[in-house]
Image (spheres, rainbow, N blue to C red):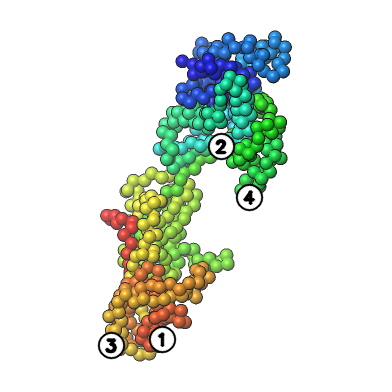
Amino acid sequence: MFPLTEENKHVAQLLLSTGTCPRCIFRFCGVDFHAPYKRPYKMKKLRHREELLNELQKFLETEKEELISDVPNPPPKKIRLQELEDGIDGIDNLSQNGEGRVSILEDGSIASKNSNLNVCNVCLGILQEFCEKEFIKKVCQKVEASGFEFTNLVFSVSFPPQLSVREHAAWLLVKQEMGKQNLSLGRNDIVQLKEAYKWITHPLFSEELGVPIDGKSLFEVSVIFAHPETVEDCHFLRAICPDCFKPAKNKQSVFTRMAVMKALNKIKEEDFRKQFPCPPNSPKAVCTVLEIECAHGAVFVAGRYNKYSRNLPQTPWIIDGERKLESSVEELISDHLLAVFKAESFNFSSSGREDVDVRTLGNGRPFAIELVNPHRVHFTSQEIKELQQKINNSSNKIQVRDLQLVTREAIGHMKEGEEEKTKSYSALIWTNKAIQKKDIEFLNDIKDLKIDQKTPLRVLHRRPLAVRTRIIHSMETRYVDEHHFHLYLKTQAGTYIKEFVHGDFGRTKPNIGSLMNMTADILELDVESVDVDWPPALDD
């Protein structure tokens, strides 16, 4: 059944006569169900001519005579009727032969070979050839050539900003005509161009690529349309509403969709009509495809690492552009993940960090890596185990365990532990005075000692100056000789252990030196455990 009613007939005839395509006519007539939009303009075989334009033409045949008297300043009746016939036939031939209508240009953009033929004065061709099967196939070819692995996708489009201007002009025309019949048409009564476009294209993309369209998919295909007459159509808005069009550093043009919509909401109807034709003029060209982009949302890999070297920073150590050490924990892990996931870049994070000369032992330190725009995302648990083994075989400075794929939300568990959990350390302490075993035993009895730590001098260049209260939950000593002993500590996360030992010129109070009434320093430090129960432990 044809979707328009007798009530729509006059508006549909008027829009068609001014150069509006059938699908845009449906939008302005409030057709909000999908099926009519999906009808092709014309089938390739002549025996299937009863398609969208032909049906619309049949529906409107009885109104042609009446239309002539309604168009402002109409040409002679005979000439105008001939133009109307030619226009309908010309639009009907928009996709004739079905082949060669859309081509990929040398710069990679896609355009129509007959781009000046009966282009819709509202959508600029978006709802004409750019939602037909041939164009969809061109886009899908680029998607398949991109090398991304995906099982579903989300499809997004970006339209030239002057489409909003042209739609506004057509709306004012239709609103005026409907007002003569004591009917109203609000801007929200018009089916959005983007909605209609997706109604048509989503099933075609899904069929061509063999995967469902899913708004929650991490894989996004976006098509960016452009038009050569954007400035010509929009410049009057800038003159009337200059505050809406302020240059932005990351925008090539001031005429963005948001800026244009902001201006259209401010401008008065009578001012708009003086500056822009209602109905809008037929365009000189059809839209072009500026870019087809494929991108995959980040995936996250987590695990725990042990660091066995006292000459390895957690992250690349670069000062004034000069690299101080050849590698880092971050790189030894991430280089392998980047290669396997075919990602563009990564972001490394962990539950705290150790100094370059500190080892991390025990069950390791939790870490997570965000892999940006990965081309491969599906792995079996066995493949992840093999990847972990590959990392571990590549260096004797680190080892990784419990490697697994996680969600972005799950990383929050790791960050929570940075300040809230406890950490255990072992340190080799030196004293300037000779000591006996009895001189250090009192430390074993101290529980939940509160200390105040002013930001250490060694990290003052990257941390704000502040006094932080931390708790030393427990200490245990093991005598070595008259100038050395081992100290085992369990502390609140975020405690600066080295400063707790030597005092940092009085910036940490109390400290081991002040408690023992002598000078103390730390020779070696190991992280024995980071008590964050994340990520979940896996079987070897």
Q: Residues within 10 Å of mark 2 (few under 14, many from 20)?
A: some
Amino acid carrying label 3: it is Lys
Give the alpha-carbon distance from disc 2 to disc 4, as whole Å.
19 Å
* Residue 301 vertical placement versus 148 (above, below): below
Amino acid carrying label 1: it is Thr
Q: Element at badge 1?
A: loop
Residue 438 circle label = 3
Say left or right for 190 vs 470.
right
Residue 158 circle label = 2
Q: Element at badge 4?
A: loop
Amino acid carrying label 2: it is Ser
Q: Element at badge 2?
A: strand
Q: Position of residue 349 (x, y in %)?
A: 43, 59
Q: Residues within 10 Å of mark 4 (few under 14, many from 20)?
A: few
Instruction: Report whether residue 172 is seen.
Output: yes
Which residue extends farthest front? 182
* Residue 347 vertical placement versus 210 (above, below): below
Residue found 39% across the figure and 56% down from its top: 412
Amino acid carrying label 4: it is Lys
Q: Position of residue 262 (x, y in %)?
A: 61, 40
Which residue corresponds to mark 4?
A: 249
Tag nearer the camera, 3 or 2 = 2
Which residue corresponds to mark 1?
A: 519
Residue found 65% across the figure and 32% down from its top: 269
Q: Position of residue 537 (x, y in %)?
A: 29, 56
Q: Element at badge 3?
A: helix
Q: Residues within 10 Å of mark 1 (few under 14, many from 20)?
A: some
